[in-house]
Amino acid sequence: MAVILQTLNGRVRPGRGWQSAVRIQLAITLALVPISVALFQGFSLASPLGNALAIPMVEFAITPLALLAMIIPAGWVLELAHTLTVWMMAALEWLSGFPLALYEHPLPPPWLLAAATAAVSLLILPRGTPGRFAALATLSGFFLWQPERPQPGDFRVAVLDVGQGLAVHVQTARHDLLYDSGPFFGETSDAGERVVVPYLRAIGVERLDAALISHDDSDHAGGLESVLARVRVGEVFAGGETAEPEEPPKPGAWNARDARLAPVRGTPCVAGLNWRWDSVDFTVLAPARLSGKRRGNDESCVLRVSAAGGASLLLTGDLGQAGETGLVQQYGPALKSTAVLAGHHGSRSSSSLTFVETVYPEIVVFSSGYRNRYGHPHPQVLARWARAVARPFRTDSGGTVLLETEGGRMKANSWRDAHPRYWYGR
């Protein structure tokens, strides 16, 4: 309403009806750009056309018919209002399907959002207002801004807070990889849609060079379909084959363990795969081969990421102690890493003492859900990693865990520690 009042006031003479309507619509669209980017990492380019259709239909047809139905209790009145609403929504849905209907933009820092808000507030003032050129320059800087990426030879990692599951984003200077995609949240919702995709949009990632699914458990692969539907993915590496549940789920008793995953199709993820992005090495250490038959958590695809300066990260999926023993026997001291993602969310069936002492990291990350029913991470597992003097980071208490290499060293922090809020207890 403030934008409408500001747009209509301060003019030498009032504009014509259609001119005022166009001016108001464009002013509202422009004024809401910073807020839309802050909340949704994008804004609608189709909204002026959509409002040009929806506002007259609602104001002059649908709402009067609904009010008329309160006076004339005739079914045809509400049926007509419903029909017009259906037509309007169908037109809006068609309009929203255009490729350029939505402009996406990474989340800028607060100071740039404040500057853009001031700029659009100035631009909707009448012509002749001083400072409009500076406002245009500020808004141009807002649209051109892009998040900083790691330097060549370094990488940045986000172990996302997806609840009881796993999703890890690995970023180099010019490439992006997703390791696992998080769990199902319900029959119509998953971590890919609710967490992974919004995170990628916020940091300006429009394309993943690769997605690696460690194995086919629903808490690791449950969000993949949503990610593939909303983000361009270069190649998919699959570390396991889908297993159907022994019995179909009972009606009304749905849970993630009963979920039937679509087959994860892509390049088999087996030991020996390796590639280099921007002087950062990616090496698959396990499994040695895919059996063609589900072998459980020890079929998890284990990935090692190594920076040019020597810092490294070991991603183990749901690897159990048997799989860990195989890794130790095959690679021995070469497994030593700067940071490690604890296998199976910190279950006591993983993180054997031999494995912990062999990897001997500075940092250990646990991806688990708050107050999960399994009790992950297990106290015995926490004690083993503490014995190795590894700094623990947990998604259940600290939120998303951020790791970043620089000059051969690795920095670690959790989102809630870096952004304290009173509702976090910080």
Image (tube, rainbow, N blue to C red):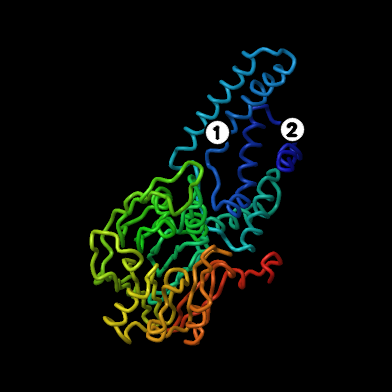
Q: Please say if the residues under marks 1 and 2 sit with CB atoms less than 8 Å apart.
A: no
User: In this orientation, does residue 212 appear?
Assistant: no
Q: Earlier in the sequence, mark 1 or mark 2?
A: 2
Q: Position of residue 189 (x, y in %)?
A: 50, 48
Secondary structure found at label 1: helix
Density class for disc 2 (Cα within 10 Å; few <14, some 14-19, many ≥20) is few
Q: Which residue corresponds to the image point at 54% horizontal and 50% vertical from the top-left?
A: 42
Q: Which residue corresponds to the image point at 31% horizontal and 66% vertical from the top-left?
A: 299
Density class for disc 1 (Cα within 10 Å; few <14, some 14-19, many ≥20) is few
User: In this orientation, does residue 174 appear?
Assistant: yes
- Residue for badge 1: 49
- Residue for badge 2: 13
Disc 1/disc 2 C-alpha distance (Å): 26 Å
Kind of residue indicated by mark 2: Arg
User: On screen, 130 above or below 320?
Assistant: above
Kind of residue indicated by mark 1: Leu
Residue 79 vs residue 138, the one in the foreground: 79
Q: Position of residue 388 (x, y in %)?
A: 47, 87
Q: Which residue corresponds to the image point at 61% horizontal and 45% vertical from the top-left?
A: 30
Residue 418, quarter of picture? bottom right
Residue 36 vs residue 232, the one in the foreground: 232
